[in-house]
Image: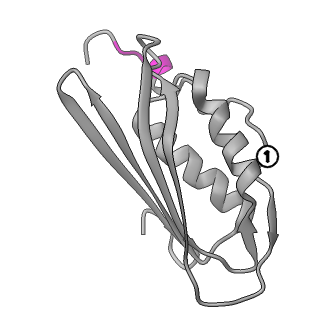
């Protein structure tokens, strides 16, 4: 890969981000979908802005994601340099750590840049872990 380094690939993965808060779920066997149609981050190599839609789907176990804290968490990516794949996987891992859902997926649909667009999907299931 010409011009890209391991440092580019890892950039932003350990950045301190706002806490995703939760609240107690009162029901069982339902799914929540949260869409963030104005997500922005930055390319870790060029510093150019990336725009996209993030769609979080999860089945709560005992906790639900509190929307304002999730919005503030996503807003922290605005100036953070990460590749699309890292954004999707990091967000999903942080959501899972916060609310410990039965299952979850995060789809990132990133706007076209240079004639190419990308969609990245990461999944989690309590029984099988990430990538199930």
Q: Nearer the viewer, residue 75 or 103?
A: 75
Residue 92 rendering spot, x and y as whole percentages = 56, 54
Residue drawn at point x = 48 percent, y = 38 percent = 86
Instruction: For mark 1, give the secondary structure.
Output: loop
On the rendered image, what quadrant is the C terminus found in? bottom left
> On screen, 49 above or below 31?
above
Residue 113 rendering spot, x and y as whole percentages = 27, 24
Residue drawn at point x = 80 percent, y = 56 percent = 21
Q: Nearer the viewer, residue 107 or 53?
A: 53
Q: How many badges with numbers are in the image?
A: 1
> On screen, 123 above or below 72?
below
Specify start and end residues of the magenta stretch as a single range: 4-8
Residue 125 rendering spot, x and y as whole percentages = 52, 73
Q: In terms of image quadrants, where is residue 84?
A: top left
Colour option used: one colour
Q: Nearer the viewer, residue 36 or 12?
A: 36
Residue drawn at point x = 51 percent, y = 31 percent = 40
Task: Let me know if residue 36 is in the magenta part.
Answer: no
Q: Residue furthest front?
A: 37
> On screen, 12 above or below 18?
above
Residue 104 rendering spot, x and y as whole percentages = 53, 68
């Amino acid at each position: 890969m010409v011009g890209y380094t391991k440092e580019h690939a890892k950039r932003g993965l350990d950045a301190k981000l706002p806490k995703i808060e939760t609240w107690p779920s009162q029901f069982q066997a339902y799914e929540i979908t949260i869409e963030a149609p104005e997500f922005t981050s930055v390319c870790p190599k060029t510093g150019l802005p990336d725009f996209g839609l993030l769609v979080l789907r999860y089945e709560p176990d005992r906790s639900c994601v509190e929307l304002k804290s999730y919005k503030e968490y996503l807003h922290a990516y605005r100036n953070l340099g990460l590749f699309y794949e890292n954004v999707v996987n990091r967000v999903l891992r942080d959501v899972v750590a916060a609310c410990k859902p039965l299952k979850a997926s995060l789809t990132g649909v990133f706007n076209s840049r240079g004639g190419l667009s990308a969609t990245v999907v990461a999944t989690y299931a309590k029984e099988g872990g990430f990538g199930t």
